[in-house]
Image (cartoon, grey):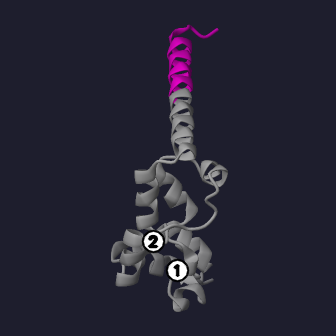
Amino acid sequence: MTSHKTTQTMKPATAAKKLGVYLEATPAEFREGVVSRNELNALQADPPQWLQELRRNGPHPRPVVAAKLGISIAGLARGGITEALTTDEIDALKKDSPQWLQRERATQAEVRKEALRIKEKNAQRADHSAGEPRS
């Protein structure tokens, strides 16, 4: 009995997400085909010029925009940002620092603070219960 190893492939949208780029800004041959795991690894290891350019200047997908602004994806939507943005547009938003962005950054800071508090509380609980004798 011989085992046939099939090549694992993914849709271009999945590959673009893994590469952190906006699918609609990728070359047509990337959008119209399928991407194998080996091709994805090659793109990550030695990105071609188009991928380097997209990562540097955008347009960037919403998760990347949110990360660059230091807010959540939901915060982007609340701020009215529903489309991909270029690096220049992101930098302009940071410079202008509109009220909604300040508010979302403050919200995100509170969320991180609360997550840290919960993590520390759980760690203390785990330390405490580890010290108790089992019956």
The residue lying at 40 percent from left, 52 percent from top is 95
Say few, some or many: other residues with alpha carbon within 10 Å of mark 1 (under 14 / 14 to 19 / 20 or more).
Answer: some
Q: What residue did someone put label 1 on?
A: 25
What secondary structure is found at the residue carrying circle 1? Answer: helix
The picture places residue 65, in percent across and down from the top left corner, at: 51, 59
**Mark 2 or 1, nearer chain start:** 1
Magenta span: predominant SS is: helix
Is residue 45 or residue 94 the one in the foreground?
A: 94
The residues colored magenta run 116-135
Q: What residue did someone put label 2 on?
A: 58
The residue lying at 46 percent from left, 79 percent from top is 38
Image quarter hosting the N terminus: bottom right
Q: Is residue 92 left or right of residue 36?
A: left
Is residue 10 or residue 75 the one in the foreground?
A: 75
The residue lying at 61 percent from left, 59 percent from top is 81
User: Is residue 49 at all visible to an observer of this figure?
Assistant: yes
Q: Is residue 118 left or right of residue 95?
A: right
The picture places residue 106, in percent across and down from the top left corner, at: 52, 35
Asked if 48 appears above or below 117 in the picture, the reply is below
Is residue 45 or residue 58 the one in the foreground?
A: 58
